[in-house]
Image (cartoon, grey):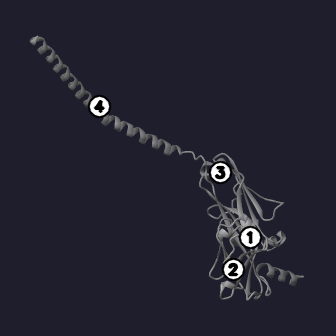
Amino acid sequence: MCLLGLILLCVLLTGTSEVDVTHVFFGSGEDVRLPCNNALSNCTSTVWIYDRDSVELITLGIKRKYTEIHERLSLGSDCSLNIKNITKDDSRSYTCRQYLNGVQEGNDARVYLHVLHVSSSSSQSEIRSGRSLTLFCQLYYDPVSCDTLIREGLHLIWVDETGMNLTDSRFQISFSSGQCLSVSLSTTLLNEDHNREWRCELKQRDQLKTSVLYTVKYSGTKLDPAKTASWLIRVILIIVEVAVFTAPSVLLLQIICERRAGRKNSHQSNQIEMSTVFQ
């Protein structure tokens, strides 16, 4: 029985001599590279198959354009399959196969892509100080059983920006009984939580496999009172300076206008007097 368990472990983590099996773990949003361990010298013999629908993504080194993820795909120089900005739905098995003259060459090289994903209970407009927030972290996997993952020591934890476990009483960490490798983080947000980073980590015993970062971004950030007071003082000083330097100019302009008006009135009076004399 122990020998059988050891054989199953080898199949899960390293594959067998007949079918090369690789398990990779990434966080959603990452760009990933899936190795083709049976590649020949020329990638024109390489076929990549999306095992969810048995659809060919790459056919003899050429990307198929009708597939749902073709825009995010590319073939590496070593015949690896590159996928940009992975999502939880990309968590499937992928098979690299080689063909020469229409005949399969060698055995399949299979890669199981497992994706760690974090979602929020609140929309972005609802995230602000004083509101409650729950973050859900889950590993999406296929087709390994939950019991196998747990037996191999895989587990999830929440840590802060320093890498320390979130054990403070203001955080409630809970594990879902209905979902495998799923953990939630709940808390009431404080003013100082704006721009704070919390990370969900997937570990196999003490080894980090992958992680996903969540940064708290407030939708309506409150101004700091000290900064607000400083800003008001600067505005008041500007107004005072403008008033001090503007008032003399306004007064001088008023005097000039009054003098010009006086001269004009005097000139009009002289014209009237002269007109009276000549009459």
Kindly identify which residue carries mark 4.
Answer: 250
The quarter of the rendered structure image containing the N terminus is bottom right
Kindly identify which residue carries mark 2.
Answer: 35
Q: Which of the two discs, 1 and 2, labels the residue nearer the N terminus?
A: 2
Q: Which of the two discs, 2 and 3, labels the residue nearer the N terminus?
A: 2
Q: Which of the two discs, 3 and 4, labels the residue nearer the N terminus?
A: 3
Residue 187: x and y in percent read 70, 52
Amino acid marked by disc 2: Pro
Is the residue under label 1 in contact with that under label 4 (CB below 8 Å)? no
Image position of 263 with respect to 273: above or below: below
Q: Secondary structure at mark 2?
A: loop
- In front: label 1 or label 2: 2
Query: Furthest residue to the right?
Result: 1
Query: Furthest residue to the left?
Result: 278
Q: Secondary structure at mark 1?
A: strand
Q: Which mark is residue 114?
A: 1
Q: Quadrant of residue 144?
A: bottom right
- In front: label 2 or label 3: 2
Kindly identify which residue carries mark 3.
Answer: 124
Amino acid marked by disc 4: Val
